[in-house]
Amino acid sequence: MLLFAFTLALPGDSLDRGALRLLADNGASEEAMALLFAVMGTMRSVALFANGKLPLYGPLMRYAGSLVGALTWSAMMTPLLLDSLITRKVSLFVPLLGMLTLGELISVYRAVRDGGFRRR
């Protein structure tokens, strides 16, 4: 997420090419997306650090960060997926963002298991 924020913050229009232009056409400015990804990436980094230091709150922070990450990646994937279904031209970013979403959901599952939030 931090690298994605850094890429969006670079000069020029990163979202103006190819399938990512659809995200820019939906009203998402690169500056706002860069700020959002920077904040989320920083919070995730803090949560991963706290996970080892705070046995009670660390897994809870990791769980919340992974859930927000899964929602973010799936929110980016949805318009691209719908556009691929309508135009019948598959975007390369759909499976990539789908795998990032799946990875985040697996992280949610592991954080819940590690934190003991399941019923006993």
Image (spheres, helix red, strand yellow):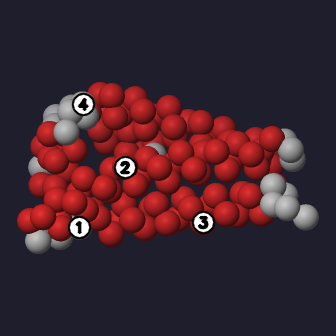
Identify the amino acid type marked 1: Leu
**Displayed quadrant of residue 93:** bottom left
Q: Which residue is mark 4?
A: 29
Where is residue 10 drawn, in percent x and y?
27, 35
- Residue 49 in view (yes/no): no
Q: CA distance from mark 3 to mark 4?
A: 30 Å
Callout 3 amino acid: Ile
| Neighbour tally class for label 4: few under 14, some 14-19, many 20 plus, Cα within 10 Å | some
Q: Earlier in the sequence, mark 1 or mark 4?
A: 4
Pointers 3 and 4 in contact (CB under 8 A)?
no
Residue that numbered label 3 is attached to = 106
Q: Which residue is mark 1?
A: 92
Disc 2 packing (10 Å; few <14; some 14–19; many ≥20): few
- Residue 74 in picture, x, y percent from top left: 40, 55
Q: Mark 2 belongs to which amino acid?
A: Ala
Report the disc number at residue 75: 2
Residue drawn where x is 74% and y is 58% of the image: 112
Residue at horizontal 37%, vertical 45%? 4
Q: Which amino acid is tagged 4?
A: Ser
Q: Residue at x 81, y 60 (%)?
A: 118
Task: Give SS at disc 2.
Answer: helix
Give the CA separation, mark 2 to mark 3. Answer: 17 Å
